[in-house]
Image (cartoon, rainbow, N blue to C red):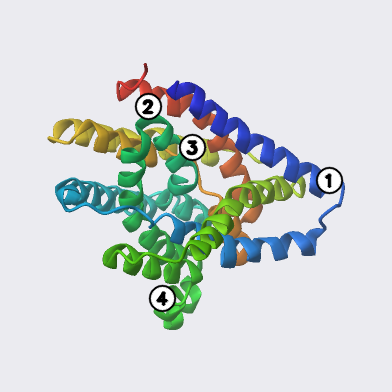
Amino acid sequence: MVLKNMLNMQMMMFLLVLIGFFIRKRDIVGTEGRKNMVDLCLYVTLPFNILNSFFVDWKWEMLISCSVILLLSIGYNALSILLSMFLFRGEKEERKKTLRYGTIVSNGGFLGNPIIEGVYGTSGLFYASIFMIPVRVVMWSVGISVFLKEKQNNLLKKILTHPCIIAVEIGAVIMGTGLVLPKFLQMTISGLSACNTPLSMMLVGMMLAEMNPKGIVDRVMSFYAGIRLVVIPGIVFVLTMLLPVDPLLRGVAVIIAGMPAPITTALLSAKYKGDEKYATGMIFLTTLLSLVTLPLWCAALGMQH
C-alpha cells in the first residue's frame, strides 16, 4: 500500500511535468508567460501552500514528540548546510549557487507531506508539518541567501519581507494562538495551496522544454543526486537508529531528508541568476531516481506491509 501510494504520487508528478512540457513545446505558453508563471508560483501559490501547512490541531501532550522532531529537523538542516559549504567549491558561481541550494533544501513539504500521509496517516502529517518549520525558515533564509550573496546589505530585509517567510510568520501565529479562521478564508487558503503542486510541476516541464537535452546530466549532477538521495538520509537514518527516537519520528525525518531536489531550485535559479537549466536537470534526475531510492528507504525503515 505504501509503495502504491508513493508510486501514484510520483507518476502524477511526472504526468504534470509532461503536460507542462507539451504546453511549452506547442507554444500555448511563451517564454514571457512562463516567467510570469514563475512569479505567480513564488509570490502567490507557494506562500499559501506554506500557510496551509500550519493548520494543525495542537494538543499539549504532543509537546515532547514535537520537541524531538524539531531537534531532528534542526540537526538535519545543520548537516545539509554544512555539506553545502564544503561540496561543489570548484563549480562556477551560477552553478554553485544552484547546487548549494539543492543540497540545503529537499522537496520535503511538496512531495514529502503526501508520501508521509500515505505511510503514517494524519499523525505522520502533523509531525511532518512540525519538522518542516525549521526547514522552511532555513529554505527562505540560508537557502535564499545562497542566491542573494551579492546584495548582503539588504539581505535581512529581503529575507524577512519575502512572501514565503511572511507566510511562515503568519502560520506560526495562527498555530501558536489556535486562531480559527472563518470557513471561507480557510477554503481560499487551501484552494490556492492546492494550485501549487500542479503549477510548480508544469513549470518544470516548461523549463525542460526550453532546454537542450544534450549534456544535462554530468558527473557533478550524478554526485549531487547521490548526496541528496542517499548520503543525507543515510546519515539521518544511522543517527536516529543510534538515538532513542520513536520509529514514527525517525520515518518522518528520513523520508523528508531523502526527498529529491525541490522545484524552488529551478524557480529561484530563474529568478536570482542561478543556473536555471542545470537546476531543472537536477530536479528531473533526482525525482526520477527517487522512484527507486524512496521505496528503498521505506524498506529500511521497516514500513513495507
Determine contact: label 4, label 2, CB under 8 Å. Answer: no
Q: CA distance from mark 4 to mark 1?
A: 37 Å
Whichever of labels 3 and 2 marks the residue nearer the N terminus, that label is 3
Whichever of labels 4 and 3 marks the residue nearer the N terminus, that label is 4
Mark 4 Cα within 10 Å, few/some/many (few <14, many 20+)?
some
Res. 122 in view: yes
Q: Which residue is mark 4?
A: 160
Determine contact: label 4, label 1, CB under 8 Å. Answer: no
Query: Considering only vertical position in the picture, is 303 above or below 97?
Result: above
Kind of residue at disc 1: Lys
Kind of residue at disc 2: Trp
Q: Which residue is mark 3?
A: 225
Residue 122, x across and y down, in percent = 36, 39
Res. 212 in view: no
Query: Considering only vertical position in the picture, is 136 above or below 297?
Result: below
Residue ID at (47%, 66%): 164
Q: Which residue is mark 1?
A: 25
Along the line of sight, the residue nearer the viewer: 209 or 132: 132
Q: Secondary structure at mark 3?
A: helix
